[in-house]
Amino acid sequence: MEEVKFNFEDLKVYQKALDFVDLVYLITSNFPDKEKYGLSSQFTRSAVSIALNTAEGSGDSDAQFHRYLQIAEGSVRECVTCATIANRRNYITQEENFKARNILLELLKMIRSLQYYLKSKRSN
């Protein structure tokens, strides 16, 4: 049986967001138990939010999609803060922090590129 595929699943930014979610689940699995409902939960929710908002917005108008991408951009900044706190608390290594921040920077650039494209479509 052939798998059903949705259009947003072909977006590179969506795929990159899913890769980041995998990384966050991996690194938060090593957080102390006391962070299960704190930083660990917040970090995973904000990472998942990037993918969710990208997917949800893609099926709407360009203006609405742009708005969902703004929300995803906010979630990227939230993840940067979570990674910073986790690094300062020694829950993640400097290397894990570096890897997370690099992926987040790449995601931010991809989101802004897509926003620029959507905006340029409206002005033509």
Image (cartoon, helix red, strand yellow):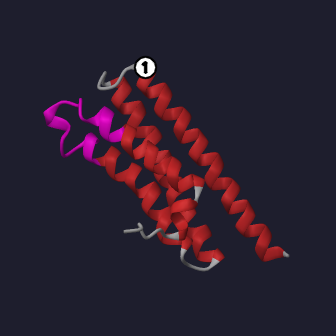
In the visual, does 12 lie left or right of 1?
right
Residue at the far right: name it.
Answer: 124
Q: Quadrant of the C terminus?
A: bottom right
In the visual, does 119 lie left or right of 73?
right
Q: Residue at x 43, y 19 (%)?
A: 94
> Please, what is the dominant secondary structure of the magenta stretch?
helix
Question: Where is residue 57 drawn, in percent x and y?
Answer: 53, 71
Q: Quadrant of the N terminus?
A: bottom left
* Viewer-nearest residue: 109 or 38: 109
63 relative to 41, above or below: below
In the visual, does 29 lie left or right of 21?
left
Q: Quadrant of residue 60?
A: bottom right
* SS category of the residue bearing label 1: helix
Mark 1 packing: few (<14 Cα in 10 Å), some, or many (20+)? some
Q: Residue at x 53, y 66 (%)?
A: 8
Question: Where is residue 41 drawn, in percent x and y?
Answer: 26, 47
Question: Where is residue 3 drawn, in percent x and y?
Answer: 41, 66
67 relative to 89, above or below: below
Question: Where is residue 54 drawn, in percent x and y?
Answer: 51, 62
**Label 1 sits on what residue type?**
Gln
19 relative to 98, above or below: below
Residue 30 lies within the magenta run: yes
Q: How many marks?
A: 1
Residue at the far left: name it.
Answer: 33
Q: Residue at x 34, y 44 (%)?
A: 43
Residue at the far bottom: name it.
Answer: 61
Disc 1 target residue:
94
In the rendered structure, which segment of residues is drawn in magenta? 24-41
In the visual, does 69 lie left or right of 118?
left
